[in-house]
Amino acid sequence: MSQLWHEIRHTPLLWLLVLAPLVLVAHSAVPDAHTLLFLLSVLAIIPLATLLSHATEAVAARTGDTVGSLLNATLGNLTELIIALAALRLGQYTLVKASLAGAIVCNTLFMLGASFLLGGLKYHVQDYNRVSARLQTSLLFLATIALIVPSAMADADSVAAAPDFMQDLSFGLAIVLIIAYGLGLFFSLKSHREFFGSAEHASASDEAPWPLSVALATLAAVTIMVALVSEVFVESVQQAAETFGMTPAFVGFIVVALVGAAAEMTSAFSGARKNRLDLSVGIALGSAAQIALFVAPVLVLLSYVIGPTPMDLQFWPGAVIMVLVATMTAIIVTNSGRAAWFVGVLMLMVYLIFAMTLYLLPPKLL
């Protein structure tokens, strides 16, 4: 336990962990104080996500490259998955879909762009493994196609006459995307790992790794706390959004996405500042691909079990366009395998345009 306490004492962000139990106490005492609960839950989820990331890395370091990489791929977006599950159970499908699309765009544009900017401010030019980036952007493009097809078919007369078509199509697409996700892992971790492995290895840490028992216990405890706090977050987010003048699309697309990706952003930005841009690109694009190919399909399948009705993959046209633009931007930018600070600025400007549009968007147009 000494390593865990040392990590908490020497990481100021983790001092906010005290807010996690405070959120639960406040929810029991003043359940109608939605704005207060929203702010507290946002501040509590960020350190919980950070600690969850540290625990995942500690477990992965003990299990070997292949299993460790698979573990990181599975648990890297656990915070987003838990938040989405809480919204899914309450039937807030608009929030779920907005958070999924927002997570893809946030990781692809904001996280990657900010990494390029922060790294470029310290180093003149940075290089990274463009083969790995091409794989992740190719997977993202496949997922984008899976989002475009249901939205494109939604207004067809034959679809309107067959109300079950969209759910059946979404179920089939979810299976296809999960298979593609699994094959992508096999390709990068097994059959052609020589092209990707070197980009994923970090330098040895000076600190002693956590014991496996401590890492697993931390992982379990933090996952439970994230689930509890996420329930409060989802219950209060809509009313708090009205207080702050935010549209439902902005909340899901921007706020939820940024909160859920807080831990990954910390690692990505740190890697860029240390001239380990392979790590930053891998986290940003890998996380976006995981959301698109694993988290979204899993939520569609789970909606048959825990949701009030099955959820489909039909997103509103604006979300599909933004995901497509973000994916194409990533494909163009990462084609050279080199980055500078101005490239990051351009990507952040694209994200700012999306955020501005969603903030001003009238809710009834969603």
Image (cartoon, rainbow, N blue to C red):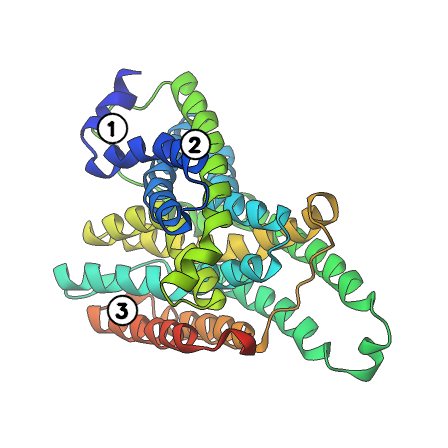
x then y, percent, for residue 264: 36, 48
Quarter of the picture holding the C terminus: bottom right
Amino acid type, label 3: Gly
Say whether residue 84 is left or right of residue 38.
right
Crowding around mark 1 (Cα neighbors within 10 Å: few <14, some 14 to 19, many 20+) is some
Q: Which residue is mark 3?
A: 344
x then y, percent, for residue 204: 26, 33
Amino acid type, label 2: Ala
Residue at horizontal 66 percent and vertical 75 percent from the top:
151
Is the C-beta separation of discs 3 and 2 under 8 Å? no
Mark 1: secondary structure: helix
Crowding around mark 2 (Cα neighbors within 10 Å: few <14, some 14 to 19, many 20+) is many
Amino acid type, label 1: Ile
Q: Give the spatial CA distance, label 3 vs label 1.
A: 31 Å
Quarter of the picture holding the N terminus: top left
Residue at horizontal 53 percent and vertical 46 percent from the top:
81
Residue at horizontal 22 percent and vertical 23 percent from the top:
6
Residue at horizontal 20 percent and vertical 27 percent from the top:
9
Mark 2: secondary structure: helix
Residue 65, can we see it?
Answer: no
Relative depth, front residue between 109 and 87: 87
Q: Quadrant of residue 22?
A: top left
Crowding around mark 3 (Cα neighbors within 10 Å: few <14, some 14 to 19, many 20+) is many
Residue 277, can we see it?
Answer: yes
Q: Which residue is mark 2?
A: 60
Q: Which residue is mark 1?
A: 8
x then y, percent, for residue 346: 29, 75
Between marks 3 and 2 in the image, the one whose residue lies nearer the viewer: 3
Q: Earlier in the sequence, mark 2 or mark 1?
A: 1
